[in-house]
Image (cartoon, helix red, strand yellow):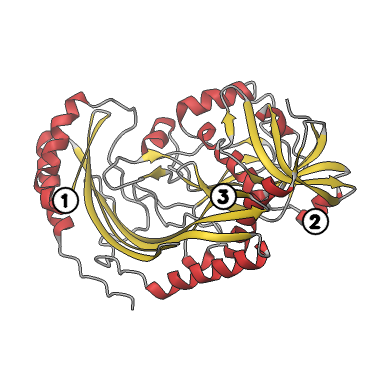
Amino acid sequence: MRSERVRDDGLFEALFSRAARQTVREGESAELYERRGALLEISEDEEGARLLVSHERGFAVRLFRSGRSAFGAATPEAADSLVESAREALPRARARRGARAAPPVSGDPQTPSVAGAPALPEEAPAREILASLRRYVTAVGEGAAVLTAASVSQGERIERLATTAGRNAAWTSRAASLVATVVGRSGADRFSARVVAAAARPEELPLARLARYAVDRALLPLLGRPLDGTRRDLLLDAHVAAHVVGRLAPLFLGDEGAALLEARTRDSRDPFASPAVTLVDDASVSGGPVRTLRDGEGTPQGRHVVVERGIPVLRLSDSAEAARHGTASTGNAVRRAWSEPPLLGVTNFFIDPGGGVAPLQLLSGATRGLYAAVLLERPSVDVAADRFRLTVAGYTLEKGRASGRVSEAVVSGRISEFLRRIEAVGDDLRFVSGAGGGVGSPTLFVPRWKSE
């Protein structure tokens, strides 16, 4: 049974009141952040099933003075010294132009409702997820693949933030993840594949697709044949393409990424990608593993198009980045943990499938090609050097049909050329975890690609 929420104990208000008094005396501004979380995880393997339940609570403060900011974090038991420890670090802190406590957000209530501690998720949905995944793997694998280990976790998080500049916000989010290991067998040969999925809700975990992907990763290396680098029409599965998309995210974050993007587009004289490519960051998109109302600085989040039909049109920002450029923050301050300061990052970063076509329609356009169905190892994408290399398995294509299994093939070349040669995208947007958030893509079609 799902546990009840615990009422708030008022510690956040007491700490913020103390921080506000101290920072005003010192001519500083301050931000106080609290995160409370509850997590349930169930694991199954050959040794049996295990249940893990955990709770977290932590406070973090940032002090701001003349463009410098200092960070401190503590558990409730050590929170009394939180402000003092950050103030000691402030003279040595690195200056960042625009760094300051965030002001209030228009339309926000002055006293947001707070739910207290999050409730622990129920066990039954997690156990059903594992049972369903096992059934899918058994059906798809047809006796040649077996699920040997899996774990599912689901949790709820409550976050609060207040600043001496007037911002005051509280919000709740949920998340679920699944990790599975599938072993494929062919005669005396075995191949093991580990797959990971994340979603904003347990019921949104793509169990059927994950089972198919895991079985392909486990069996294609055993049943297929290697493929050479001959020029071919290339169909990149959405799961494979998503990992490439994730490596592009830093180009739209911070000054270093801006300089690299300008170099790649010759100060915007060249397109970044083909007109088929529109890149979006959206914390509320359906199917995205990240779904929150606000970023780590309490800024409301929304949909932001960063590349429209191949042309860069926007950069992602947090409060400091926005202040430097005189723009509104896009809500991209990300806190990976309560004990770490927020960083500039993505929420759900993906190629928009709007205007895309069914993958089967893309397949029909492949005269002689390769369908890259799965990744066999971590992709190598060096945006600064303009190079990428993917080791994949999949299927050969002849006149729009699969004609054989491929155990291993290499897709490589210049990332800039690859992006500009994408002729069409599918309508099958899929997400994976990456770039500090979720990264996604539909199936991509690149005609006559020759790996280097």
Left or right: residue 446 versus residue 82 is right
Characterize the local packing of mark 3: few (<14), some (14-19) or many (20 or more) Cα atoms within 10 angstroms: some
| Secondary structure under the numbered disc 2 in the rendered image | helix
Q: Nearer the viewer, mark 2 or mark 3?
A: 3
Indicate which disc, 2 or 3, sits on the residue closer to the N terminus. 3
Residue receiving disc 2: 360
Residue at 26% x, 72% y is 5
- In this rendering, the label closer to the viewer, 1 or 3: 3
Q: How far apart are marks 1 and 3 (CA)?
A: 48 Å
Any part of residue 213 in sight: no
Q: Residue at x 58, y 61 (%)?
A: 146
Q: Which of marks 2 and 1 is in front?
A: 2
State left or right for residue 292 relative to residue 285.
left
Q: Is tag 2's residue or tag 1's residue first in the polypeptide sequence?
A: 1
* Image coordinates for residue 264, horizontal then vertical, percent: 62, 24
> Which residue type does callout 1 highlight?
Phe
- Residue 141 appears in the rendering: yes
Quadrant in which the N terminus appears: bottom left
Q: Earlier in the sequence, mark 1 or mark 3?
A: 1
Q: Where is residue 256 in the image (x, y as percent from the top left)?
A: 47, 25
Which amino acid does the dot numbered 3 rest on?
Ala
**At numbered mark 3, what does the secondary structure look like: helix, strand or loop?**
strand
Residue 60 horizontal/vertical position (percent): 23, 46
Front residue of 59 and 271: 59
Q: Nearer the viewer, residue 196 or 324?
A: 196
Up-down relation of residue 198 to residue 23 (above or below): below
Residue that badge 3 annotates: 193
* Amino acid type at mark 2: Leu
- Residue found at x 76% / y 34%: 421
The residue pinned by badge 1 equals: 16
Q: How far apart are marks 2 and 1 (CA)?
A: 57 Å
